[in-house]
Image: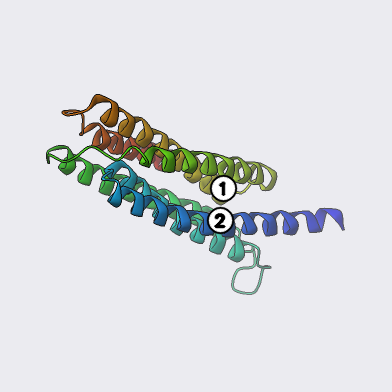
Amino acid sequence: MTTSTAPVSSSASSQRLAQLGLVVNALLAVVKLVAGLLGNAYALVADAIESSTDMIGSLVVWSGLRIASRDPDERYPFGYGRAEALAGAVVAALMLGAAIGIAIEAAQEIRTPHHAPAPWTLGVLALVIVVKEILAKRVLAASEASGSTAVAADAWHHRADAITSAAAFIGIAVAIIGGPGWEPADDWAALVAAAVIAVNGGLI
């Protein structure tokens, strides 16, 4: 009985984490978007876009896990296990698409004169980094316990968001401390974030 219930329990735990990730990403996306727009920080706006792909990614992973947990039937006598791998592939594609979009917008922002970001946006990013790293560690532990490719992809998606937030933090800090002439540091940070997202998507 123990061997038959363990996978189910692991799958249920992974699904709960995917649901938690969905809620957290939705909240963070809104917070970062509003803070980025009000605080004149494009790196934060780019980070909000990344969180939006995280949100969609968590939804895809959750759906994939639900489908994969179904019992074999006449249509799929070997089960639905491949749904997990497909979910991981969709998450990777979302990351690559987000990276391209962010890079294009950041390149345009670099060429456009603008004000430096507001200092308080650094506090928002610090909070985001902590939350996302905690979530990444929890989901990564769940992926190791379940052996799920989709859950592992979701974990690295969370970690990529923490890394992009760290890049945004550095870029905004440089723009604020550097003063006039250093405003594009915020946009260069967004480009770094895009590169990190693309690399993680490719690895997944």
The reply to whether discs 2 and 1 touch (Cβ–Cβ < 8 Å) is: yes
- Look at 52% across and 58% down and name the residue there: 22
Q: Crowdedness of circle 2 by 10 Å Cα count: few (<14), some, many (20+)?
A: many
Q: Nearer the viewer, residue 139 or 44?
A: 44
- Look at 25% across and 42% down and name the residue there: 103
Residue holding disc 1:
149
Residue 5: quadrant of the picture: bottom right
Q: Nearer the viewer, residue 15 or 135?
A: 135
* Left or right of 69 on screen, residue 156: left
Residue 84's disc is 2
- Look at 21% across and 33% down and name the residue there: 183
Residue 192 position within the rendered picture, expressed as x and y whole percent measured from the top left: 31, 34
Residue 119 position within the rendered picture, expressed as x and y whole percent measured from the top left: 33, 37
Q: Nearer the viewer, residue 57 or 34?
A: 34
**Amino acid tagged 1:** Thr
- Look at 30% across and 46% down and name the residue there: 39
